């Protein structure tokens, strides 16, 4: 029993001595590995700041800039960790770490497919020059001003001040109309006048009123005017003209102004804008003789 104890003690001491010798031999490697990690840390901080400055020239959103900077810092620190493990001759640990990272990454990717899709879509949207914060856009049935683009969603503020939050993936996969990419918009105005109206006078008056109401319309000749149909109660027309505007609200204001001024001009000139009516005609010439004959009793 005593011999077994002494033998076990000798083995333990032998192992401790070998470990100690190994540590002494690898002290330079330990120091070098620590220096590598310290260098990687400070390099990551510098690259993070540099990435924020570079990305800031293309992207306005702070959330996107910070996310890209963090990813860059993580990549640099990870590379430093791999170099440090290589310095310590831990190639097997490095291989196991890479294999584990691959398995974990696959599992996370499968579990967060929707989230990752929105994240990558947010990055792509942030670098698109045709979609910027402050633009007035219309997509997936919603219309409003873009007030935020982050890694998860796309936020619109509608004309009624309601906020609409749309997943980035939805924005990227659906058509989007951007009213702010051009400084000109065309206003469409439809109306109708009574059948008794002088159609040539209506056309000239309408075009002149619009030309006088908007500085962007140089003359009446710049206003398009077309009669479109004989309606049930009126002769309908379509009027079109260009204005300087970058949002749907400006277009609606211009249309409102045009309707008000046209109504004033029509009232002054006695031009009727009829509303739908239905006229019922009754024939009062009754055939009394036939009625009387039918009322006589038959023999």
Image (cartoon, rainbow, N blue to C red):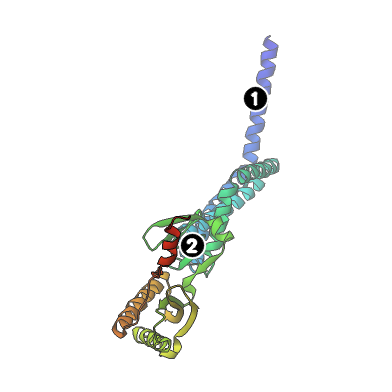
The residue lying furthest to the front in this view is 299
- Give the residue at the far left of this rendering: 268
Viewer-side residue, 250 vs 104: 250
Residue 232 visible to an observer of this rendering:
yes
Looking at the image, residue 262 sits to the left or right of residue 23; the answer is: left
Q: Residue at x 55, y 54 (%)?
A: 119
Where residue 278 sits in the image (x, y, percent)?
A: 41, 68
Q: Residue 33 in the image: x percent, y percent?
A: 60, 47
Q: Which mark is residue 52?
A: 2
Badge 1 or badge 2: first in the primary sequence: 1
Q: Position of residue 63 (x, y in %)?
A: 46, 57
From the viewer's side, name the closer residue of 184 and 19.
Answer: 184
Residue 161, by quadrant, is bottom left
Instruction: Examine the rendering and report whether any part of residue 146 can be seen.
Output: no
If the image is split into quadrants, where does the N terminus sit?
A: top right
As drawn, 193 above or below 286: below
Q: CA distance from mark 1 to mark 2?
A: 55 Å
Residue neighbourhood size for the residue with mark 1, other residues' Cα within 10 Å, grouped as few (<14), some (14–19), many (≥20) = few
Label for residue 13? 1
Left or right side of 293 for 4: right
């Amino acid at each position: 029993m005593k011999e077994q104890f002494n033998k076990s003690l000798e083995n333990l001491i032998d192992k401790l001595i070998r470990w100690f010798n190994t540590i002494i031999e690898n002290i330079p490697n330990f120091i070098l590995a620590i220096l590598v990690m310290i260098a990687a840390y400070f390099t990551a901080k510098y690259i993070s700041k540099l990435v924020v400055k570079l990305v800031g020239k293309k992207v306005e959103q702070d959330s996107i800039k910070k996310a890209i900077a963090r990813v860059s810092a993580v990549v640099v620190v990870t590379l430093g960790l791999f170099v440090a493990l290589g310095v310590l001759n831990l190639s097997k640990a490095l291989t196991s770490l890479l294999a584990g990272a691959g398995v974990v990454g696959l599992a996370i990717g499968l579990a967060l497919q929707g989230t990752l899709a929105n994240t990558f879509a947010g990055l792509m949207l942030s670098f698109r020059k045709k979609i910027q914060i402050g633009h007035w856009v219309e997509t997936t049935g919603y219309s409003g001003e873009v007030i935020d683009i982050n890694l998860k969603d796309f936020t619109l503020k509608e004309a009624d001040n309601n906020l609409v939050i749309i997943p980035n993936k939805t924005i990227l996969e659906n058509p989007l109309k951007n009213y702010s990419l051009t400084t000109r918009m065309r206003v469409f105005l439809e109306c109708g006048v009574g059948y008794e109206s002088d159609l040539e006078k209506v056309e000239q008056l309408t075009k002149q009123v619009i030309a006088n109401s908007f500085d962007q319309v140089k003359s009446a000749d710049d206003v398009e005017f077309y009669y479109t149909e004989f309606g049930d109660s009126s002769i309908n027309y379509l009027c079109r003209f260009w204005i300087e505007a970058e949002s749907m609200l400006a277009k609606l204001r211009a249309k409102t102004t045009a309707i008000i001024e046209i109504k004033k001009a029509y009232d002054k000139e006695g031009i009727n804008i009829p509303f739908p009516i239905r006229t019922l005609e009754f024939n009062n010439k009754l055939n009394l003789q036939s009625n009387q004959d039918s009322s006589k009793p038959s023999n």
